[in-house]
Amino acid sequence: MKTQTPFDEIAAIDRELTELAPRVRQGFLCLGGPSEQVEQAIRDAARHAAARTRPAWPRYRMLAVAASLALLLGGAIQQLVSQHTGQNRPALPTDAAADMRIDDSTAGLANLLLEIQGLNEDDFFRTEEAESLWL
Amino acid sequence: MPEPDISDAELLQAFTEGHAAAFDKLVGRYRQPLYTWLLGMTANRADAEDLYQEVWFRVIRHAARFNDVSFRAWLWKIARNLLIDFRRKRKPDISLDAVADTEDEPLIDRLAASGTEPARQVELDDMTRRVMRAVATLPEVQREVFLMRVQGDLPFNEIAATLRIPLNTALGRMHDAMGKLKKLLAEET
């Protein structure tokens, strides 16, 4: 007699089950499923657990924040370096005033030299005007 | 019917990454087989519901630790362990066919009568009722294997692994259960 292997036995059982199993399934199906209250409790627990494991911010937002921080940090470093080396330092208002004073004194000196030499054109025109009035 | 493109393990993985909808899908796949298996083992709707809920709570808690080959086998392992704990703490097993003290009606009929879907009670024809009664009279070790195969659709090797018994023992129990069912049904006709 041929020895029956577990594989043969499984096949034989499954063949026998083809008639019985649908009846059992149908019977249990008629008994209904778990209540809505239980199902809701499971859904709530799953939502709660999923919310805990989900990262608060999506990855691309984290990247954007990291890039912004890197830019800010870079700007701050650049500013510090510029202050130390004196390069790219913006002109301060006091410096501008000093420049203007230098300009004024230079113009005054030039006028004085022109007057000494009798070449001051301003005086020349004023003289012309005075002449006409005088006449 | 389970979608063939997404496996149970993938759904569980998605859940551990924060997708609750994946878990809902997983629960949907095993709602009926798991619940009815528990109902068949406890013969009590309230107990079956408590255990069913606790099984899924445990899956939620230990989802990240899942490393079994089969999610289905893991699920039934959890369910069976909880059932064993439940029995240790509570009353002994009551047969589905047992007659309650106060009501002269087998539990199987009372369960059907208290079902949430009254329209389906009509569908419980005589033959199905007889099969259910016959299943209810099976010894627990046989009923466990029989319902795991029929309701849970577990392959025999997974049933054996879940129950921590050799494959031949699982097949033997199933064989005995089938023989008993055939005999019972033949006697009734």
Image (cartoon, coloured by chain):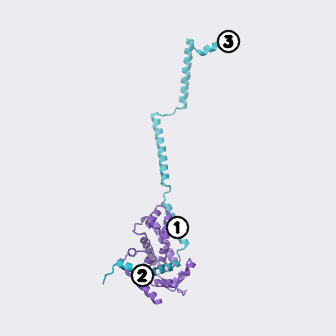
Chain colours: A cyan, B purple
Type of amino acid at the residue the image marks with label 2: Glu
Gap in angstroms between the C-alphas marked 3 and 2: 138 Å
Vertical arrangement, residue A111 with respect to residue B177, above or below: above
Marks 3, 2: nearer the viewer: 2
Q: Earlier in the sequence, mark 3 or mark 2?
A: 2
Front residue (pair A42, A26):
A26
**Residue B181 picture location, percent across and down:** 44, 85
Front residue (pair B52, B27):
B27
Query: Counting other residues with Cα less than 10 Å from the Cα at mark 2, is it few (<14), some (14-19), or many (20 or more)?
Result: few
The residue wearing badge 3 is A132
Type of amino acid at the residue the image marks with label 3: Ser
The residue wearing badge 1 is A43
Q: Chain ID for label 1?
A: A
Residue farthest toward the left in the current orientation of the protein: A1
Cβ–Cβ under 8 Å for marks 1 and 2: no
Numbered label attached to residue A16: 2
Residue farthest toward the top in the current orientation of the protein: A135
Q: Chain ID for label 3?
A: A
**Residue A1 picture location, percent across and down:** 30, 84
Gap in angstroms between the C-alphas marked 1 and 2: 38 Å
Gap in angstroms between the C-alphas marked 3 and 1: 107 Å
Considering the numbered disc 3 on the image, is that residue within a helix, a strand or a loop? helix
